[in-house]
Amino acid sequence: MATQNWRSKKGLKHGRLSLIVVAVLILAALPFVIGSPYYVHLLIVAGMNAVLAMTFIMMLRTGLISLGIAAFWGVGAYASAAIVLKAGLSFWIALPGATIITALVAWGIGYVVVRNTGFSFIILTSVIGMVAGLVFGNITWLGGFPGIEYIPPPHQISLPFLPPILFISKIPNYFLMLVLFFLVVISFQALYTSSTGRAWMAIGLNPHLAASKGVNVLRYRLAAFVIASAAAGLEGSFYAHYIGSINPNAFNIFKTINVQIFAILGGVGSVFWGPVIGSLIMTFVPEWLRIAKEVEPILTGVLLILLVIFLPGGVLSLVNSRPRQWKPFAGIARIAGFMRKSSTE
Amino acid sequence: MLEVRKLSKFFGGLAALGEVDLDILDGEVLGVIGPNGAGKTTFFNVVSGFYAPNAGTVRFNGVDITGLKAHQVAQVGISRTFQAANLFMALSVLDNVFYSLHLGYQTGILKRFLHTRSAVDESRRLKQNAADILEFMGLGSLKDEPAAKLTHGRQKVLGICMALATDPKLLLLDEPFTGMNPAEIETMVKLVHRIRDRGVTIAIVEHNMQAVADLCDRVVVLNYGRKIAEGLHKQIVEDPVVIEAYLGKDEDQ
Protein backbone atom coordinates (compact mmCIF):
# COMPACT_ATOMS: atom_id res chain seq x y z
CA MET A 1 0.00 0.00 0.00
CA ALA A 2 2.01 2.92 1.28
CA THR A 3 5.23 1.26 0.23
CA GLN A 4 4.30 1.70 -3.43
CA ASN A 5 4.51 5.47 -3.34
CA TRP A 6 7.47 5.50 -5.69
CA ARG A 7 5.28 4.34 -8.53
CA SER A 8 3.28 6.87 -10.45
CA LYS A 9 -0.46 6.68 -9.88
CA LYS A 10 -1.27 5.72 -13.44
CA GLY A 11 1.45 3.09 -13.51
CA LEU A 12 0.14 1.68 -10.30
CA LYS A 13 -3.36 1.39 -11.70
CA HIS A 14 -2.19 -0.41 -14.85
CA GLY A 15 0.18 -2.57 -12.84
CA ARG A 16 -2.57 -3.54 -10.48
CA LEU A 17 -5.05 -4.26 -13.25
CA SER A 18 -2.69 -6.56 -15.13
CA LEU A 19 -1.78 -8.24 -11.85
CA ILE A 20 -5.45 -8.95 -11.22
CA VAL A 21 -5.95 -10.33 -14.76
CA VAL A 22 -2.94 -12.64 -14.41
CA ALA A 23 -4.07 -13.75 -10.96
CA VAL A 24 -7.59 -14.57 -12.18
CA LEU A 25 -6.20 -16.53 -15.16
CA ILE A 26 -3.88 -18.52 -12.92
CA LEU A 27 -6.69 -19.24 -10.47
CA ALA A 28 -8.99 -20.36 -13.30
CA ALA A 29 -6.34 -22.68 -14.75
CA LEU A 30 -5.22 -24.03 -11.38
CA PRO A 31 -7.65 -26.95 -10.90
CA PHE A 32 -6.95 -28.25 -14.45
CA VAL A 33 -3.21 -28.06 -13.88
CA ILE A 34 -3.42 -29.74 -10.51
CA GLY A 35 -5.73 -32.52 -11.68
CA SER A 36 -5.90 -34.28 -8.32
CA PRO A 37 -9.43 -33.78 -6.91
CA TYR A 38 -8.00 -33.98 -3.42
CA TYR A 39 -5.78 -30.93 -3.95
CA VAL A 40 -8.68 -29.06 -5.57
CA HIS A 41 -10.66 -29.88 -2.43
CA LEU A 42 -7.89 -28.41 -0.28
CA LEU A 43 -7.93 -25.26 -2.41
CA ILE A 44 -11.68 -24.92 -1.90
CA VAL A 45 -11.25 -25.31 1.86
CA ALA A 46 -8.39 -22.81 1.85
CA GLY A 47 -10.52 -20.31 -0.08
CA MET A 48 -13.35 -20.62 2.45
CA ASN A 49 -10.95 -20.26 5.35
CA ALA A 50 -9.36 -17.19 3.76
CA VAL A 51 -12.75 -15.45 3.65
CA LEU A 52 -13.34 -16.29 7.31
CA ALA A 53 -9.92 -14.85 8.15
CA MET A 54 -10.88 -11.70 6.21
CA THR A 55 -13.95 -11.29 8.41
CA PHE A 56 -11.71 -11.54 11.47
CA ILE A 57 -9.51 -8.78 10.09
CA MET A 58 -12.52 -6.60 9.25
CA MET A 59 -13.60 -6.59 12.89
CA LEU A 60 -10.00 -6.25 14.05
CA ARG A 61 -9.78 -3.06 11.98
CA THR A 62 -12.39 -1.46 14.23
CA GLY A 63 -10.53 -2.62 17.32
CA LEU A 64 -12.69 -5.68 18.05
CA ILE A 65 -11.24 -9.17 18.46
CA SER A 66 -14.12 -11.57 17.81
CA LEU A 67 -14.09 -15.19 18.95
CA GLY A 68 -17.54 -15.80 17.51
CA ILE A 69 -16.82 -16.04 13.79
CA ALA A 70 -17.42 -19.79 13.54
CA ALA A 71 -20.80 -19.35 15.24
CA PHE A 72 -22.02 -17.10 12.42
CA TRP A 73 -20.44 -19.39 9.85
CA GLY A 74 -22.58 -22.09 11.48
CA VAL A 75 -25.71 -19.93 11.39
CA GLY A 76 -25.22 -19.57 7.64
CA ALA A 77 -24.67 -23.32 7.19
CA TYR A 78 -27.71 -24.33 9.26
CA ALA A 79 -29.95 -21.65 7.73
CA SER A 80 -29.00 -22.76 4.24
CA ALA A 81 -29.51 -26.46 4.99
CA ALA A 82 -32.90 -25.66 6.54
CA ILE A 83 -34.02 -23.57 3.57
CA VAL A 84 -33.16 -26.36 1.11
CA LEU A 85 -34.19 -29.42 3.15
CA LYS A 86 -37.12 -28.08 5.19
CA ALA A 87 -38.53 -25.44 2.87
CA GLY A 88 -37.59 -27.33 -0.28
CA LEU A 89 -36.13 -24.30 -2.02
CA SER A 90 -33.14 -24.14 -4.34
CA PHE A 91 -29.57 -23.60 -3.15
CA TRP A 92 -29.52 -20.42 -5.22
CA ILE A 93 -32.23 -18.98 -2.98
CA ALA A 94 -30.71 -20.48 0.16
CA LEU A 95 -27.31 -18.86 -0.48
CA PRO A 96 -28.52 -15.22 -0.29
CA GLY A 97 -31.25 -16.24 2.17
CA ALA A 98 -28.76 -17.74 4.62
CA THR A 99 -26.54 -14.67 4.25
CA ILE A 100 -29.44 -12.37 5.14
CA ILE A 101 -30.51 -14.57 8.07
CA THR A 102 -26.93 -14.56 9.40
CA ALA A 103 -26.79 -10.78 9.04
CA LEU A 104 -30.05 -10.41 10.99
CA VAL A 105 -28.87 -12.73 13.76
CA ALA A 106 -25.55 -10.84 13.88
CA TRP A 107 -27.41 -7.54 14.02
CA GLY A 108 -29.43 -8.70 17.05
CA ILE A 109 -26.40 -10.08 18.88
CA GLY A 110 -24.09 -7.28 17.74
CA TYR A 111 -26.49 -4.62 18.97
CA VAL A 112 -25.68 -5.82 22.48
CA VAL A 113 -22.06 -6.93 22.23
CA VAL A 114 -20.44 -4.05 20.31
CA ARG A 115 -21.23 -1.80 23.27
CA ASN A 116 -18.38 -3.59 24.97
CA THR A 117 -14.78 -3.28 23.90
CA GLY A 118 -11.45 -4.86 24.72
CA PHE A 119 -11.59 -7.88 27.01
CA SER A 120 -15.35 -7.72 27.58
CA PHE A 121 -15.94 -8.03 23.85
CA ILE A 122 -13.51 -10.96 23.58
CA ILE A 123 -15.19 -12.73 26.50
CA LEU A 124 -18.70 -12.09 25.17
CA THR A 125 -17.92 -13.32 21.66
CA SER A 126 -16.06 -16.34 23.05
CA VAL A 127 -19.22 -17.19 25.00
CA ILE A 128 -21.15 -16.94 21.72
CA GLY A 129 -18.52 -19.18 20.13
CA MET A 130 -18.81 -21.75 22.91
CA VAL A 131 -22.61 -21.73 23.15
CA ALA A 132 -23.28 -21.83 19.41
CA GLY A 133 -22.52 -25.56 19.11
CA LEU A 134 -24.82 -26.34 22.05
CA VAL A 135 -27.60 -24.22 20.60
CA PHE A 136 -27.40 -25.93 17.21
CA GLY A 137 -27.23 -29.32 18.91
CA ASN A 138 -30.29 -28.71 21.05
CA ILE A 139 -32.56 -27.82 18.17
CA THR A 140 -33.86 -31.25 17.24
CA TRP A 141 -35.62 -29.80 14.21
CA LEU A 142 -32.12 -29.05 12.88
CA GLY A 143 -30.84 -32.56 13.44
CA GLY A 144 -29.69 -32.22 17.06
CA PHE A 145 -26.15 -33.18 18.00
CA PRO A 146 -25.66 -35.70 15.16
CA GLY A 147 -26.22 -32.84 12.74
CA ILE A 148 -27.74 -32.84 9.27
CA GLU A 149 -26.75 -35.32 6.57
CA TYR A 150 -27.48 -35.58 2.88
CA ILE A 151 -27.52 -31.87 2.18
CA PRO A 152 -27.75 -31.74 -1.61
CA PRO A 153 -24.96 -30.04 -3.56
CA PRO A 154 -25.82 -26.73 -5.26
CA HIS A 155 -28.52 -27.32 -7.89
CA GLN A 156 -27.41 -27.36 -11.47
CA ILE A 157 -27.41 -24.12 -13.42
CA SER A 158 -27.32 -23.32 -17.11
CA LEU A 159 -25.15 -20.53 -18.39
CA PRO A 160 -25.18 -19.36 -22.02
CA PHE A 161 -22.69 -21.13 -24.35
CA LEU A 162 -21.97 -23.80 -21.72
CA PRO A 163 -23.45 -27.22 -20.98
CA PRO A 164 -25.50 -27.30 -17.75
CA ILE A 165 -23.19 -27.09 -14.74
CA LEU A 166 -23.56 -29.84 -12.17
CA PHE A 167 -21.95 -29.24 -8.79
CA ILE A 168 -21.10 -32.87 -8.18
CA SER A 169 -17.40 -32.89 -9.01
CA LYS A 170 -14.75 -30.69 -7.43
CA ILE A 171 -14.04 -28.32 -10.30
CA PRO A 172 -17.48 -26.61 -10.54
CA ASN A 173 -17.45 -26.23 -6.76
CA TYR A 174 -13.98 -24.74 -7.01
CA PHE A 175 -15.29 -22.09 -9.41
CA LEU A 176 -18.29 -21.41 -7.20
CA MET A 177 -15.85 -20.92 -4.29
CA LEU A 178 -13.84 -18.50 -6.46
CA VAL A 179 -16.95 -16.50 -7.36
CA LEU A 180 -17.97 -16.19 -3.71
CA PHE A 181 -14.37 -15.40 -2.74
CA PHE A 182 -14.16 -12.53 -5.22
CA LEU A 183 -17.66 -11.34 -4.34
CA VAL A 184 -16.46 -10.92 -0.75
CA VAL A 185 -13.06 -9.48 -1.73
CA ILE A 186 -14.57 -6.90 -4.09
CA SER A 187 -17.26 -5.79 -1.65
CA PHE A 188 -14.79 -5.63 1.22
CA GLN A 189 -12.38 -3.63 -0.92
CA ALA A 190 -15.18 -1.24 -1.93
CA LEU A 191 -15.94 -0.73 1.77
CA TYR A 192 -12.32 -0.32 2.81
CA THR A 193 -11.66 2.34 0.16
CA SER A 194 -14.85 4.30 0.93
CA SER A 195 -15.73 6.57 3.85
CA THR A 196 -16.81 3.46 5.78
CA GLY A 197 -13.31 1.98 5.65
CA ARG A 198 -11.79 5.27 6.72
CA ALA A 199 -14.19 5.50 9.66
CA TRP A 200 -13.32 1.89 10.64
CA MET A 201 -9.62 2.66 10.44
CA ALA A 202 -10.07 5.81 12.53
CA ILE A 203 -12.02 3.86 15.17
CA GLY A 204 -9.39 1.12 15.25
CA LEU A 205 -6.57 3.62 15.68
CA ASN A 206 -8.27 5.81 18.29
CA PRO A 207 -12.00 5.47 19.04
CA HIS A 208 -12.26 8.64 21.15
CA LEU A 209 -10.56 10.72 18.51
CA ALA A 210 -12.83 9.22 15.83
CA ALA A 211 -15.92 10.07 17.90
CA SER A 212 -14.74 13.65 18.28
CA LYS A 213 -14.71 13.89 14.47
CA GLY A 214 -18.36 12.90 14.27
CA VAL A 215 -17.94 9.15 13.69
CA ASN A 216 -20.71 7.16 15.35
CA VAL A 217 -18.40 4.52 16.83
CA LEU A 218 -21.13 2.09 17.92
CA ARG A 219 -22.90 2.16 14.59
CA TYR A 220 -19.72 1.61 12.57
CA ARG A 221 -18.61 -1.21 14.86
CA LEU A 222 -22.05 -2.80 14.52
CA ALA A 223 -21.80 -2.44 10.72
CA ALA A 224 -18.42 -4.21 10.72
CA PHE A 225 -19.83 -6.94 12.95
CA VAL A 226 -22.89 -7.49 10.73
CA ILE A 227 -21.02 -7.34 7.41
CA ALA A 228 -18.25 -9.66 8.63
CA SER A 229 -20.82 -12.11 9.99
CA ALA A 230 -22.85 -12.00 6.77
CA ALA A 231 -19.73 -12.93 4.78
CA ALA A 232 -19.11 -15.79 7.22
CA GLY A 233 -22.74 -16.87 6.74
CA LEU A 234 -22.32 -16.84 2.97
CA GLU A 235 -19.32 -19.16 3.28
CA GLY A 236 -21.28 -21.29 5.75
CA SER A 237 -24.04 -21.79 3.20
CA PHE A 238 -21.55 -22.90 0.56
CA TYR A 239 -19.75 -25.13 3.09
CA ALA A 240 -22.95 -26.97 4.06
CA HIS A 241 -23.80 -27.83 0.45
CA TYR A 242 -20.25 -28.53 -0.63
CA ILE A 243 -19.42 -30.92 2.22
CA GLY A 244 -22.96 -32.34 2.24
CA SER A 245 -23.30 -32.69 6.01
CA ILE A 246 -22.94 -30.44 9.02
CA ASN A 247 -22.77 -31.06 12.75
CA PRO A 248 -22.64 -28.65 15.68
CA ASN A 249 -19.02 -29.48 16.53
CA ALA A 250 -17.72 -28.03 13.28
CA PHE A 251 -18.76 -24.56 14.42
CA ASN A 252 -17.13 -24.48 17.84
CA ILE A 253 -14.68 -21.92 19.14
CA PHE A 254 -11.61 -23.87 17.98
CA LYS A 255 -12.63 -23.16 14.41
CA THR A 256 -12.54 -19.44 15.22
CA ILE A 257 -9.12 -19.80 16.82
CA ASN A 258 -7.90 -21.54 13.67
CA VAL A 259 -9.31 -18.68 11.61
CA GLN A 260 -7.35 -16.22 13.73
CA ILE A 261 -4.20 -18.22 13.16
CA PHE A 262 -4.75 -18.00 9.39
CA ALA A 263 -5.03 -14.23 9.71
CA ILE A 264 -2.11 -13.77 12.10
CA LEU A 265 0.14 -16.17 10.17
CA GLY A 266 -0.44 -14.27 6.95
CA GLY A 267 -0.25 -10.89 8.61
CA VAL A 268 -3.13 -8.85 10.01
CA GLY A 269 -1.76 -5.68 8.45
CA SER A 270 -3.10 -6.84 5.10
CA VAL A 271 -6.82 -7.24 4.59
CA PHE A 272 -6.69 -9.79 1.75
CA TRP A 273 -3.24 -11.24 1.08
CA GLY A 274 -2.57 -12.09 4.72
CA PRO A 275 -5.67 -14.29 5.07
CA VAL A 276 -5.02 -15.96 1.69
CA ILE A 277 -1.39 -16.78 2.44
CA GLY A 278 -2.17 -17.83 6.00
CA SER A 279 -4.98 -20.17 5.08
CA LEU A 280 -3.05 -21.68 2.14
CA ILE A 281 -0.10 -22.46 4.42
CA MET A 282 -2.28 -23.83 7.20
CA THR A 283 -4.30 -25.98 4.80
CA PHE A 284 -1.46 -27.45 2.77
CA VAL A 285 1.49 -27.73 5.16
CA PRO A 286 -0.21 -30.18 7.56
CA GLU A 287 -1.20 -32.25 4.52
CA TRP A 288 2.31 -32.35 3.17
CA LEU A 289 3.72 -33.20 6.56
CA ARG A 290 1.10 -35.96 6.76
CA ILE A 291 0.14 -34.89 10.21
CA ALA A 292 -2.67 -36.77 11.89
CA LYS A 293 -5.74 -34.84 12.96
CA GLU A 294 -4.93 -35.45 16.65
CA VAL A 295 -1.58 -33.69 16.41
CA GLU A 296 -2.94 -30.68 14.55
CA PRO A 297 -4.03 -28.64 17.62
CA ILE A 298 -0.53 -29.03 19.05
CA LEU A 299 1.00 -27.88 15.77
CA THR A 300 -1.28 -24.86 15.56
CA GLY A 301 -0.64 -23.95 19.19
CA VAL A 302 3.13 -24.14 18.82
CA LEU A 303 2.90 -22.25 15.55
CA LEU A 304 0.89 -19.45 17.14
CA ILE A 305 3.42 -19.03 19.96
CA LEU A 306 6.34 -19.01 17.52
CA LEU A 307 4.54 -16.53 15.30
CA VAL A 308 3.84 -14.04 18.05
CA ILE A 309 7.48 -14.14 19.12
CA PHE A 310 9.33 -14.26 15.81
CA LEU A 311 6.98 -12.83 13.27
CA PRO A 312 4.39 -10.56 14.86
CA GLY A 313 3.72 -9.00 11.46
CA GLY A 314 2.96 -12.35 9.81
CA VAL A 315 4.47 -13.92 6.69
CA LEU A 316 3.74 -10.77 4.71
CA SER A 317 6.08 -8.73 6.90
CA LEU A 318 8.91 -10.78 5.34
CA VAL A 319 7.97 -9.49 1.91
CA ASN A 320 7.24 -5.91 2.87
CA SER A 321 10.23 -5.20 5.07
CA ARG A 322 13.78 -5.12 3.81
CA PRO A 323 15.62 -8.42 4.39
CA ARG A 324 18.12 -6.94 6.82
CA GLN A 325 15.28 -6.06 9.13
CA TRP A 326 14.47 -9.71 9.59
CA LYS A 327 16.56 -10.88 12.49
CA PRO A 328 15.54 -14.34 13.63
CA PHE A 329 18.23 -14.31 16.28
CA ALA A 330 16.74 -11.20 17.80
CA GLY A 331 13.66 -13.32 18.44
CA ILE A 332 15.71 -16.03 20.14
CA ALA A 333 17.48 -13.39 22.21
CA ARG A 334 14.08 -12.05 23.20
CA ILE A 335 12.90 -15.49 24.35
CA ALA A 336 16.14 -15.97 26.28
CA GLY A 337 15.67 -12.59 27.91
CA PHE A 338 12.06 -13.37 28.71
CA MET A 339 13.00 -16.71 30.31
CA ARG A 340 15.77 -15.10 32.31
CA LYS A 341 13.38 -12.48 33.58
CA SER A 342 10.67 -14.96 34.52
CA SER A 343 13.14 -17.30 36.24
CA THR A 344 14.47 -14.53 38.46
CA GLU A 345 11.00 -13.46 39.53
CA MET B 1 -23.25 30.99 21.54
CA LEU B 2 -22.80 28.42 24.30
CA GLU B 3 -24.89 28.76 27.45
CA VAL B 4 -23.96 26.49 30.31
CA ARG B 5 -26.27 26.51 33.33
CA LYS B 6 -25.71 24.82 36.71
CA LEU B 7 -23.59 22.12 35.09
CA SER B 8 -22.51 19.44 37.55
CA LYS B 9 -20.45 16.30 37.18
CA PHE B 10 -19.64 13.95 40.04
CA PHE B 11 -17.03 11.22 40.18
CA GLY B 12 -18.16 9.18 43.16
CA GLY B 13 -18.64 11.77 45.88
CA LEU B 14 -16.30 14.29 44.29
CA ALA B 15 -17.84 17.19 42.41
CA ALA B 16 -15.51 17.69 39.46
CA LEU B 17 -17.95 20.36 38.32
CA GLY B 18 -20.37 22.01 40.74
CA GLU B 19 -23.17 24.08 39.27
CA VAL B 20 -21.00 25.90 36.78
CA ASP B 21 -22.65 28.77 34.89
CA LEU B 22 -20.67 29.84 31.87
CA ASP B 23 -21.30 31.64 28.61
CA ILE B 24 -19.18 31.64 25.52
CA LEU B 25 -20.01 34.64 23.34
CA ASP B 26 -20.10 34.66 19.57
CA GLY B 27 -16.69 35.37 18.06
CA GLU B 28 -14.68 35.62 21.25
CA VAL B 29 -11.64 33.76 22.54
CA LEU B 30 -12.42 32.63 26.06
CA GLY B 31 -9.72 31.41 28.44
CA VAL B 32 -10.63 28.80 31.04
CA ILE B 33 -7.95 28.72 33.72
CA GLY B 34 -7.52 27.31 37.19
CA PRO B 35 -5.15 25.21 39.26
CA ASN B 36 -4.60 21.52 38.45
CA GLY B 37 -7.72 19.48 39.18
CA ALA B 38 -10.00 22.50 38.98
CA GLY B 39 -12.35 20.77 36.55
CA LYS B 40 -11.31 22.53 33.34
CA THR B 41 -10.82 19.42 31.24
CA THR B 42 -13.90 17.82 32.81
CA PHE B 43 -15.81 20.88 31.65
CA PHE B 44 -14.60 20.30 28.08
CA ASN B 45 -15.34 16.58 28.33
CA VAL B 46 -18.92 17.24 29.42
CA VAL B 47 -19.58 19.92 26.80
CA SER B 48 -18.10 17.78 24.01
CA GLY B 49 -20.15 14.73 24.98
CA PHE B 50 -17.42 12.47 26.36
CA TYR B 51 -19.00 12.54 29.84
CA ALA B 52 -22.73 12.84 30.52
CA PRO B 53 -23.40 15.57 33.12
CA ASN B 54 -25.19 14.70 36.38
CA ALA B 55 -27.16 17.94 36.34
CA GLY B 56 -27.46 21.19 34.45
CA THR B 57 -27.96 22.15 30.83
CA VAL B 58 -25.77 23.04 27.87
CA ARG B 59 -27.36 25.06 25.08
CA PHE B 60 -25.59 25.75 21.82
CA ASN B 61 -27.06 28.55 19.68
CA GLY B 62 -30.33 28.08 21.54
CA VAL B 63 -30.48 24.30 21.05
CA ASP B 64 -30.28 22.01 24.07
CA ILE B 65 -27.31 19.69 23.57
CA THR B 66 -27.09 18.37 27.13
CA GLY B 67 -26.09 14.72 27.19
CA LEU B 68 -25.55 14.32 23.44
CA LYS B 69 -22.92 11.76 22.44
CA ALA B 70 -19.49 12.93 21.29
CA HIS B 71 -20.22 12.32 17.58
CA GLN B 72 -23.51 14.22 17.84
CA VAL B 73 -21.80 17.19 19.47
CA ALA B 74 -19.34 17.21 16.57
CA GLN B 75 -22.31 17.26 14.18
CA VAL B 76 -23.88 20.37 15.75
CA GLY B 77 -20.63 22.28 15.23
CA ILE B 78 -18.51 21.96 18.36
CA SER B 79 -15.03 20.53 17.89
CA ARG B 80 -12.33 19.87 20.44
CA THR B 81 -8.68 18.99 20.73
CA PHE B 82 -7.12 16.80 23.37
CA GLN B 83 -4.44 17.54 25.93
CA ALA B 84 -1.98 14.91 24.82
CA ALA B 85 -1.12 14.97 21.13
CA ASN B 86 -4.00 12.74 20.09
CA LEU B 87 -3.49 11.74 16.47
CA PHE B 88 -3.88 8.73 14.19
CA MET B 89 -0.17 8.03 14.58
CA ALA B 90 -0.04 5.31 11.93
CA LEU B 91 -1.35 7.64 9.20
CA SER B 92 0.25 10.40 7.20
CA VAL B 93 -0.32 14.04 8.15
CA LEU B 94 -2.71 14.49 5.21
CA ASP B 95 -4.67 11.33 6.03
CA ASN B 96 -5.05 12.43 9.64
CA VAL B 97 -7.06 15.41 8.40
CA PHE B 98 -8.70 13.49 5.53
CA TYR B 99 -9.97 10.79 7.92
CA SER B 100 -11.24 13.56 10.23
CA LEU B 101 -13.46 14.93 7.43
CA HIS B 102 -16.02 12.22 8.14
CA LEU B 103 -18.86 14.74 8.40
CA GLY B 104 -18.01 16.20 4.99
CA TYR B 105 -19.59 13.38 2.96
CA GLN B 106 -22.88 14.37 1.30
CA THR B 107 -23.45 11.53 -1.19
CA GLY B 108 -25.49 8.53 -0.14
CA ILE B 109 -23.73 5.63 1.53
CA LEU B 110 -24.70 3.29 -1.33
CA LYS B 111 -23.12 5.61 -3.88
CA ARG B 112 -19.96 5.69 -1.79
CA PHE B 113 -19.94 1.89 -1.58
CA LEU B 114 -20.39 1.61 -5.35
CA HIS B 115 -17.72 4.27 -5.97
CA THR B 116 -19.93 6.21 -8.37
CA ARG B 117 -18.36 9.16 -10.11
CA SER B 118 -19.97 11.67 -7.75
CA ALA B 119 -18.73 9.76 -4.71
CA VAL B 120 -15.18 9.48 -6.07
CA ASP B 121 -15.17 13.19 -6.94
CA GLU B 122 -16.38 13.95 -3.46
CA SER B 123 -13.54 11.97 -1.83
CA ARG B 124 -11.08 13.79 -4.05
CA ARG B 125 -12.58 17.13 -3.07
CA LEU B 126 -12.43 16.25 0.62
CA LYS B 127 -8.79 15.22 0.26
CA GLN B 128 -8.16 18.64 -1.30
CA ASN B 129 -10.02 20.24 1.64
CA ALA B 130 -7.68 18.39 3.99
CA ALA B 131 -4.67 19.74 2.09
CA ASP B 132 -6.16 23.25 2.24
CA ILE B 133 -6.61 23.06 6.00
CA LEU B 134 -2.98 21.95 6.39
CA GLU B 135 -1.86 24.80 4.13
CA PHE B 136 -3.91 27.28 6.18
CA MET B 137 -2.26 26.05 9.39
CA GLY B 138 1.26 26.00 7.93
CA LEU B 139 1.73 22.23 7.69
CA GLY B 140 1.25 22.04 3.90
CA SER B 141 4.84 21.01 3.21
CA LEU B 142 4.67 18.12 5.68
CA LYS B 143 1.50 16.48 4.40
CA ASP B 144 3.12 13.21 3.34
CA GLU B 145 5.11 12.74 6.54
CA PRO B 146 3.93 10.13 9.04
CA ALA B 147 2.13 11.92 11.90
CA ALA B 148 4.29 10.11 14.44
CA LYS B 149 7.44 11.75 13.04
CA LEU B 150 6.31 15.37 13.59
CA THR B 151 7.75 17.41 16.44
CA HIS B 152 5.53 17.78 19.51
CA GLY B 153 4.63 21.35 18.56
CA ARG B 154 3.60 20.36 15.05
CA GLN B 155 1.61 17.41 16.34
CA LYS B 156 -0.39 19.88 18.42
CA VAL B 157 -1.00 22.01 15.32
CA LEU B 158 -2.08 18.89 13.43
CA GLY B 159 -4.52 18.12 16.26
CA ILE B 160 -6.11 21.53 15.65
CA CYS B 161 -6.20 20.93 11.88
CA MET B 162 -8.13 17.73 12.56
CA ALA B 163 -10.52 19.58 14.86
CA LEU B 164 -11.11 22.12 12.08
CA ALA B 165 -12.02 19.29 9.70
CA THR B 166 -15.49 19.01 11.25
CA ASP B 167 -16.07 22.66 10.24
CA PRO B 168 -16.79 23.83 13.78
CA LYS B 169 -18.46 27.05 14.90
CA LEU B 170 -17.02 26.57 18.38
CA LEU B 171 -13.53 25.18 18.91
CA LEU B 172 -12.46 23.89 22.32
CA LEU B 173 -8.67 23.79 22.72
CA ASP B 174 -7.42 21.74 25.64
CA GLU B 175 -3.96 23.00 26.70
CA PRO B 176 -2.67 23.75 23.20
CA PHE B 177 0.57 25.29 24.50
CA THR B 178 1.72 22.52 26.84
CA GLY B 179 5.29 21.42 26.30
CA MET B 180 6.01 24.00 23.60
CA ASN B 181 9.07 26.21 23.33
CA PRO B 182 8.66 30.02 23.07
CA ALA B 183 8.96 30.03 19.27
CA GLU B 184 6.28 27.35 18.94
CA ILE B 185 4.04 29.25 21.36
CA GLU B 186 4.40 32.37 19.24
CA THR B 187 3.41 30.44 16.10
CA MET B 188 0.47 28.83 17.88
CA VAL B 189 -0.80 32.23 19.12
CA LYS B 190 -0.75 33.48 15.52
CA LEU B 191 -2.58 30.38 14.30
CA VAL B 192 -5.31 30.70 16.93
CA HIS B 193 -5.78 34.34 15.90
CA ARG B 194 -6.00 33.24 12.29
CA ILE B 195 -8.71 30.68 13.13
CA ARG B 196 -10.64 33.31 15.11
CA ASP B 197 -10.45 35.69 12.16
CA ARG B 198 -12.24 33.04 10.11
CA GLY B 199 -15.23 33.46 12.41
CA VAL B 200 -14.68 30.48 14.69
CA THR B 201 -15.41 31.04 18.37
CA ILE B 202 -12.71 29.58 20.59
CA ALA B 203 -12.44 28.43 24.21
CA ILE B 204 -9.00 27.56 25.57
CA VAL B 205 -8.02 25.64 28.68
CA GLU B 206 -4.46 26.71 29.37
CA HIS B 207 -1.84 27.08 32.09
CA ASN B 208 0.48 29.35 30.15
CA MET B 209 -0.60 32.78 31.42
CA GLN B 210 1.33 34.74 28.83
CA ALA B 211 -0.47 32.92 26.02
CA VAL B 212 -3.80 33.46 27.77
CA ALA B 213 -3.02 37.17 28.12
CA ASP B 214 -2.08 37.42 24.43
CA LEU B 215 -5.10 35.52 23.14
CA CYS B 216 -8.12 35.72 25.33
CA ASP B 217 -10.79 38.39 25.31
CA ARG B 218 -12.24 37.06 28.52
CA VAL B 219 -11.08 34.65 31.21
CA VAL B 220 -13.05 32.31 33.48
CA VAL B 221 -11.37 30.87 36.56
CA LEU B 222 -12.40 27.48 37.95
CA ASN B 223 -11.31 26.03 41.28
CA TYR B 224 -12.54 22.77 42.84
CA GLY B 225 -15.17 22.50 40.14
CA ARG B 226 -16.66 25.93 40.80
CA LYS B 227 -16.41 29.17 38.92
CA ILE B 228 -14.63 31.62 41.22
CA ALA B 229 -14.02 34.54 38.90
CA GLU B 230 -14.77 35.84 35.42
CA GLY B 231 -13.65 38.92 33.53
CA LEU B 232 -10.85 40.52 31.56
CA HIS B 233 -7.36 39.07 31.99
CA LYS B 234 -6.18 42.27 33.72
CA GLN B 235 -8.93 42.11 36.31
CA ILE B 236 -8.50 38.40 36.92
CA VAL B 237 -4.81 38.49 37.76
CA GLU B 238 -5.48 41.10 40.45
CA ASP B 239 -8.49 39.32 41.94
CA PRO B 240 -7.59 38.21 45.49
CA VAL B 241 -9.80 35.11 45.21
CA VAL B 242 -7.86 33.96 42.14
CA ILE B 243 -4.51 34.71 43.74
CA GLU B 244 -5.51 32.65 46.76
CA ALA B 245 -6.67 29.77 44.60
CA TYR B 246 -3.30 29.61 42.86
CA LEU B 247 -0.87 30.53 45.62
CA GLY B 248 -2.78 29.36 48.65
CA LYS B 249 -3.82 25.93 47.45
CA ASP B 250 -1.46 24.75 44.78
CA GLU B 251 2.28 25.25 44.90
CA ASP B 252 2.98 23.46 41.63
CA GLN B 253 2.09 26.54 39.68
Image (spheres, coloured by chain):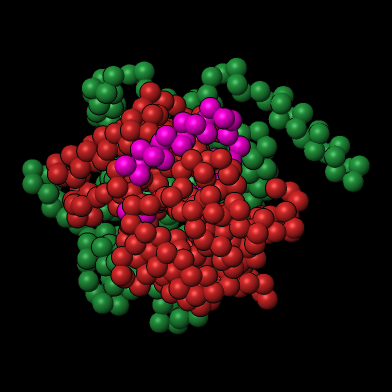
- Front residue of A55/B42: it is B42
Res A233 quadrant in image: bottom left
Q: Position of residue A251 (x, y in %)?
A: 50, 63
**In the depicted structure, whether residue A316 falls above or below residue B11:** above
In this picture, which residue range is highlighted in magenta?
B169-197
Q: Position of residue A266 (x, y in %)?
A: 51, 38
Q: Is residue A26 left or right of residue B231?
A: left
Chain B visual colour: red
Magenta segment: does it hold B170? yes
Quadrant (top left, top right, bottom left, bottom right) of the N terminus of chain B: bottom left
Res A221 quadrant in image: bottom left
- Front residue of B199/B178: it is B199
Chain A visual colour: green
Magenta segment: does it hold A344? no
**In the depicted structure, whether residue A312 falls above or below residue A73:** above
Residue A335 in sight in this render? yes
